[in-house]
Image (spheres, helix red, strand yellow):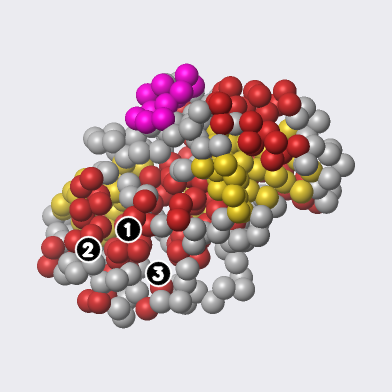
């Protein structure tokens, strides 16, 4: 299965120029912070669209912990870079994280990228949402015409899944969840980010607290029927995970492995941690009912889901119906 790509969406998708001798490359090689998986996804999608604007080949180098090539292989776009092809070329590295990333994306609304980035290889390390800003640049209307009638969720969905395909050893771990679908069971999922907590003590901020989780348990109670439903939670908190397992033992499903943040967890068993993070997001995207919290990881899972029905947003101790056009998805906020 090619997860996330809807065949009924006429995207007019545009590939970057594979014949060009110049490159735009998303890079995360341990020389600077890159953020979590959601931050990196935003940077990769932004870098790809910039490669289309500049009519260049596109690549991804992400080997700061577990090399991304162990998890994904190219789908329609060959993003694997041969160092021999670029080592003798002129290059420029743009590291724009958080505040600088925000400043850069605003400047790109009017920037002449061809003048700004003349080197043969441009490396980008970005962690904010750039698509909203790039698509406003009138200089590149022709190159970005395929974006004209696409929603943000469709753009992320088609770009990401045209670049990446799960490797078989990751794909097969989804089988238990695909089997649930075949059995006619509905998957009820939540993505819960607490932020700084005993499981991920190095997170930079507190997003929510355990005291507010009662609203989630109340929400789940109507799905506590093993003949109809399975419950799945992706979270950065061992406590939330174990609480869900104890309250809903008959309907709880899980991906084995430790709770893991790709940049802030202890650097042990890294590739298995990465595998769980990737699988968690795919499973969220397959859900019949999805609750997300304030997290790029969750927003992108909702984008990949390509279904506005039964999407809910958790804000502290309140769960409300939302869509991918709701305030939590506004580009300026992430």
Q: How many numbered badges does the structure rendering display? A: 3
Asked whether the residues under the numbered discs 1 and 2 touch, taking CB atoms below 8 Å apart as contact, a structural biologist would say yes
Position of residue 256 measured from the top left corner of the image (x, y, whole percent) = 64, 29
User: Which mark lies nearer to you, 3 or 2?
Assistant: 2
Work out whether 90 lies above or below 274: below
User: Which mark lies nearer to you, 1 or 3?
Assistant: 1
Q: What secondary structure is found at the residue carrying circle 3?
A: loop
Q: Which residue is mark 3?
A: 15
Task: Assign the magenta stretch its main secondary structure.
Answer: loop
Instruction: Name, please, the residue furthest toward the front.
Output: 318
**Image point 50% across, 65% down: which residue?**
154
Sooner in the amino-acid sequence: mark 1 or mark 2: 2
Q: Give the side of residue 133 with respect to residue 78, left or right.
A: left
**Image point 51% across, 46% down: which residue?**
298
Work out whether 30 lies above or below 98: above
Separation of residues labelled 1 and 3 (CA atoms): 18 Å
Q: Residues within 10 Å of mark 1 (few under 14, many from 20)?
A: many
Q: Give the side of residue 74 with respect to residue 116, left or right.
A: right
Q: Which residue is mark 1?
A: 130
Residue 210 in which image quadrant = top right
Q: Which residue is mark 2?
A: 108
Position of residue 79 measured from the top left corner of the image (x, y, whole percent) = 39, 55
Residue 146 in which image quadrant = bottom left
Separation of residues labelled 3 and 2 (CA atoms): 20 Å
The answer to whether residue 101 is seen in the rendering is: yes
> What span is colored magenta in the figure?
196-206
User: Which quadrant, please, contains the N terminus?
Assistant: bottom right
């Amino acid at each position: 299965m090619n997860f996330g790509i809807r065949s009924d969406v006429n995207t007019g998708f545009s590939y970057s120029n594979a014949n060009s001798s110049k490159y735009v490359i998303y890079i995360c090689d341990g020389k600077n912070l890159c953020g979590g998986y959601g931050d990196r996804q935003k940077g990769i999608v932004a870098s790809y669209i910039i490669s289309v604007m500049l009519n260049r080949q596109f690549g991804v180098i992400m080997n700061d912990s577990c090399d991304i090539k162990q998890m994904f292989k190219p789908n329609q776009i060959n993003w694997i870079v041969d160092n021999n092809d670029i080592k003798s070329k002129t290059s420029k590295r743009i590291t724009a994280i958080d505040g600088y990333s925000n400043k850069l994306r605003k400047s790109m609304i009017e920037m002449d990228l061809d003048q700004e980035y003349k080197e043969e290889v441009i490396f980008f390390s970005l962690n904010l949402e750039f698509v909203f800003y790039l698509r406003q640049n009138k200089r590149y209307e022709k190159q970005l015409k395929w974006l004209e009638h696409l929603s943000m969720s469709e753009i992320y969905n088609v770009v990401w899944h045209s670049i990446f395909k799960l490797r078989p050893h990751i794909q097969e771990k989804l089988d238990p969840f695909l089997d649930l679908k075949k059995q006619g069971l509905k998957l009820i999922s939540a993505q819960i980010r607490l932020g700084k907590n005993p499981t991920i003590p190095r997170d930079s901020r507190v997003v929510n607290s355990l005291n507010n989780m009662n609203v989630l348990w109340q929400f789940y109670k109507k799905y506590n029927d093993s003949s109809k439903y399975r419950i799945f939670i992706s979270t950065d908190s061992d406590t939330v995970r174990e609480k869900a397992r104890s309250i809903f033992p008959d309907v709880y499903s899980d991906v084995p492995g430790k709770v893991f943040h790709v940049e802030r967890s202890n650097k042990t068993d890294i590739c298995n941690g990465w595998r769980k993070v990737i699988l968690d997001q795919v499973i969220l995207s397959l859900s019949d009912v999805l609750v997300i919290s304030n997290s790029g990881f969750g927003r992108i899972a909702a984008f990949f889901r390509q279904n506005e029905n039964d999407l809910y947003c958790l804000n502290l101790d309140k769960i409300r119906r939302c869509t991918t056009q709701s305030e939590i998805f506004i580009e300026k906020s992430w």
